[in-house]
């Protein structure tokens, strides 16, 4: 049973509104290889029509090391729903697990992967740039020059929120006031920043296709756009809004036509929000760019393979080398948003606040998170333990999805397990 993402928290629908199957045919696996493994810049095959399995040993894992991986994962991570290990493009482990709330999990189950959606949003922007449907100059298009009057609402002509650009949104540097950890952890001492967007939207924001976007743009500005990094799901919605304004097509439809279809990924893009909608939009054509993507673990692996192999798929360069570099390079040293311990609101940056290394690229994490010992990776990560770790040096992808009964507090346990039971078992 695939649950609706709306059922997990009573306020979730309101919060998100504010933010706004090809079957794989297995082939015979390759024979176990010699003691040394020779890797190439591209995989031996591309799984457009289906994944091909291989023994872990043939792809460099210690003999027998993954034999009990499914059973061990069921014990150590009882909330997980799928686990895939892909090495050198071969599927070396695939297992599915049922939880009390999510049953019947298999290769065809579409999982709600929460904020891994953000990374797919980034890939879709890159695809449009590669095809020329977006230009490099479009990355610096601004709210004030791109969005229609209905989206701007009552913003004054000189309001600095009009200067937020697509690039700022991709970097999560819009400057909009938002305390994501407080919302996720439901800290009672802090105000829920989502609730304030319900107050006074009309007449400032007319009801219609741009109500959600307008509501986001009415939120207080905590920092000058482009100056401070703050993990902010508002910004991922803004990316989708920019995309549609600049291309005249929804982000999800463009992804289906130009990214998913070449990979052999099918999608249901019904406009009515239901449990079976794979990537919904709200009110109008603006896809929810920060979450709600429903996708199988195998199809998520296809997207990971594109990122592992430098934007390539077969003889196509789906994502340009320039976009691959731009979108996966960490933002380096800078200031991150700071929040008041009293009310949870963002506070001003002072001269006493040090700059830190920001482990984030354009909607991708450049760290694996706690538990993996600093292993270099590119990661898409979502609430409740949804993870797609891409280890380029090892030509390795690990995908794990989990139920959404608990939305935080699992990451370290999951990564500890992935390190000890998978990464540490690589012999070559």
Image (tube, rainbow, N blue to C red):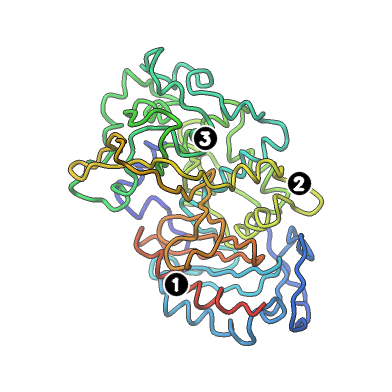
Relative to 149, 409 lies left or right: left
| Residue 290, x across and y down, in percent | 47, 44
Q: Name the residue under label 1.
A: 416
Neighbor class of circle 2 (other Cα within 10 Å; few <14, some 14-19, many 20+) is some
Q: Which mark is residue 87?
A: none
Residue that numbered label 3 is attached to: 239
Q: Do the residues under discs 1 and 2 have CB atoms within 8 angstroms?
A: no
Instruction: Please state the horizontal and vertical placement of residue 353, each as a whole percent of the image.
Output: 31, 41
User: Which residue appears farthest toward the right when viewing the image?
Assistant: 315
Residue count near mark 1 (Cα–Cα under 10 Å), binned few <14, some 14–19, many ≥20:
some
Q: Name above or below for residue 45 compared with residue 9.
A: below
Inter-mark Cα distance, 3 to 2: 23 Å
Q: Nearer the viewer, mark 1 or mark 2?
A: 1
Q: Where residue 419 sits: x, y (%)? A: 50, 73
Q: Which residue is drawn at 57% across and 66% down?
A: 398
- Secondary structure beneath label 2: strand
Camera-side residue of 55 and 358: 358
Kindly indicate whether the residue at mark 2 contacts the one at mark 3 (C-beta within 8 angstroms).
no
Q: Where is residue 408 in the image (x, y as percent from the top left)?
A: 35, 59
Which residue is identified by label 2? 317
Q: How far apart are marks 1 and 2 (CA)?
A: 35 Å
């Amino acid at each position: 049973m695939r649950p609706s993402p709306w059922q997990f928290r009573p306020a979730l629908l309101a919060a998100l509104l504010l933010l706004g199957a090809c079957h794989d045919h297995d082939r015979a696996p390759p024979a176990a290889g010699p003691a040394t493994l020779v890797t190439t810049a591209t995989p031996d095959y591309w799984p457009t029509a289906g994944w091909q399995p291989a023994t872990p040993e043939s792809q460099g894992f210690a003999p027998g090391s993954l034999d009990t991986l499914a059973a061990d994962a069921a014990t150590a991570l009882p909330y997980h729903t799928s686990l895939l290990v892909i090495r050198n493009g071969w599927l070396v482990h695939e297992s599915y697990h049922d939880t009390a709330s999510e049953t019947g999990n298999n290769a065809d189950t579409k999982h709600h992967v929460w904020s891994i959606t953000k990374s797919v949003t980034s890939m879709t922007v890159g695809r449009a740039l590669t095809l020329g449907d977006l230009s490099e100059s479009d990355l610096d298009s601004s709210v004030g020059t791109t969005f229609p009057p209905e989206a701007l609402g009552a913003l004054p002509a000189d309001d600095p929120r009009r200067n937020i650009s697509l690039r700022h949104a991709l970097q999560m540097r819009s400057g909009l006031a938002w305390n994501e950890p407080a919302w996720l952890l439901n800290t009672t001492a802090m105000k829920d920043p989502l609730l304030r967007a319900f107050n006074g939207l009309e007449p400032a924001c007319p009801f219609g296709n741009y109500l959600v976007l307008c509501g986001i743009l009415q939120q207080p500005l905590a920092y000058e756009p482009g100056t401070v990094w703050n993990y902010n799901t508002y910004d991922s919605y803004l990316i989708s809004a920019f995309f549609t304004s600049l291309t005249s097509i929804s982000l999800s439809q463009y992804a289906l036509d130009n990214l998913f279809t070449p990979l052999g990924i099918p999608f249901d893009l019904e406009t009515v929000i239901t449990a079976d909608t794979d990537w919904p939009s709200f009110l109008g054509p603006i896809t929810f760019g920060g979450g709600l993507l429903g996708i199988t673990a195998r199809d998520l692996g296809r997207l990971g393979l594109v990122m592992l192999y430098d934007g390539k798929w077969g003889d196509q360069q789906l994502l340009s080398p320039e976009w691959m570099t731009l979108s996966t390079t960490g933002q380096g040293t800078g200031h991150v948003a700071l929040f008041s311990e009293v009310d949870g609101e963002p506070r001003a940056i002072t001269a006493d606040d040090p700059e830190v290394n920001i482990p984030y690229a354009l909607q991708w994490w450049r760290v694996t998170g706690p538990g993996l010992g600093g292993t270099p990776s590119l990661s898409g990560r979502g609430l409740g333990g949804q993870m797609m770790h891409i280890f380029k040096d090892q030509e390795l992808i690990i995908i794990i999805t989990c139920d959404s009964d608990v939305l935080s507090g699992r990451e370290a346990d999951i990564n500890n397990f992935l390190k000890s039971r998978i990464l540490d078992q690589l012999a070559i």
